[in-house]
Amino acid sequence: MRGPLGAVIGRYTSSDGSDKDGIIKHNRKCRDITFLVIFIAFWVSMIVNSSFGFNQGNPLRLTYGLDYEGNVCGSSHRHRDLTQLELRYWLNPNQVYESGLKDGETTLANARTICLLDCPEPSDDTLSWVCDYPDGEIRLKMDDWIDRNYDYFEFLTPEMRNSSLQLQGPCYPLIFPTVNVYWSCQYIARASNSSLRHWEQMGGVSIQEDMIIDKSIRRSVNSRASVLKRYVADVGKSWPVLIVCGGLVPLFLSIVWLLLIRHFVAAMPWITVVLFNTLLISVTIFYYLKAGWIGDDAVTPIIGEHDPYIHVYGRELTHVRIVALLFRLYMTWYG
């Protein structure tokens, strides 16, 4: 009697054209040599590419930005140790402004950036400066530069001071407050009146105060490529949690579940329905909390303490809200 496996085990045509029953016994061999060569070349390319990425790549590039020298913030380099300096800061506000113009010649990627320990804030009664790394004529150690809040304007020669007033460095005025948004210092388009007044009195060039200076960085931080990088970086950072919560805990719970089925088989359908609905409601409430629709614990792109009146949009918040709506629709449909 033929079963469902008749196509495999039943009648077939042999290589000599006759019909035979039973297991296929004729010799098998590779016939698509061209595809085999392509397949081998593909795997050789994958191995070479993976080896190059492992030896030359830096996963920190997914999280932190680059300074104007091409160094990754938050990592150590041959000629400069930036291990503690994780935040990317744009020195020249006019370059940030020009990068936001439709016909601007400067892109944000080419604007001058350095790595800092924290995002600087303008002073209330004087003009503060953020100066470049202490190299060349500036005899100052990196630790001293950090302790001075990145300000060595008083040590500059007259020529260097005049260059700084033209926004050509090595020091740049601290006019706008900044906040840590995904390890980049986001400009807040709210210039300090005191700092701006001191800057104008010193004869500094005009500084643009338009909202473009805010939107330019925000557009870069919320680009699809940047969001994808952060998601990949999150997976890399959370691998212990993924192994425990995605592997070990489910394995343990599956064993417990089998034991419950073994000893409480009559009650298991209702237990399954109750636990499933409880879990679904809990996950939905969690996403509502992180979406900001319940309470004040919404996902925010701002890292660390900050002014509560400062609100910065992050694309991840939109993703959380979409998932919350999907869970809500699922509950409505199957509830």
Image (cartoon, rainbow, N blue to C red):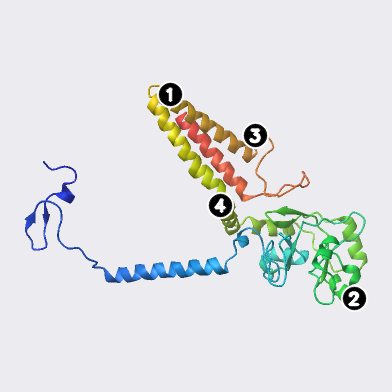
Say what amino acid the circle numbered 2 marks. Answer: Thr
Residue 51, above or below 217: below
Q: Image quadrant of residue 227?
A: bottom right
Residue mark closest to the camera, 3 vs 2: 2
Q: Position of residue 132 (x, y in %)?
A: 79, 69
Q: Which residue is mark 2?
A: 157
Marks 3/1: CA distance? 30 Å
Residue ID at (54%, 38%): 325
Q: Residue furthest top?
A: 266
Q: Label for residue 270? A: 1
Number of numbered discs visible in the structure rendering? 4
Q: Label for residue 235? A: 4
Say what amino acid the circle numbered 4 marks. Answer: Val
Which of pointers 2 and 4 lies earlier in the amino acid sequence? 2
Residue mark closest to the camera, 1 vs 2: 1
Q: Are marks 4 and 1 in contact (CB under 8 Å)?
A: no
Say what amino acid the circle numbered 1 marks. Answer: Trp
Q: Is residue 159 left or right of residue 182?
A: right
* Disc 2 secondary structure class: loop
Q: Which residue is mark 3?
A: 294
* Disc 1 secondary structure class: helix
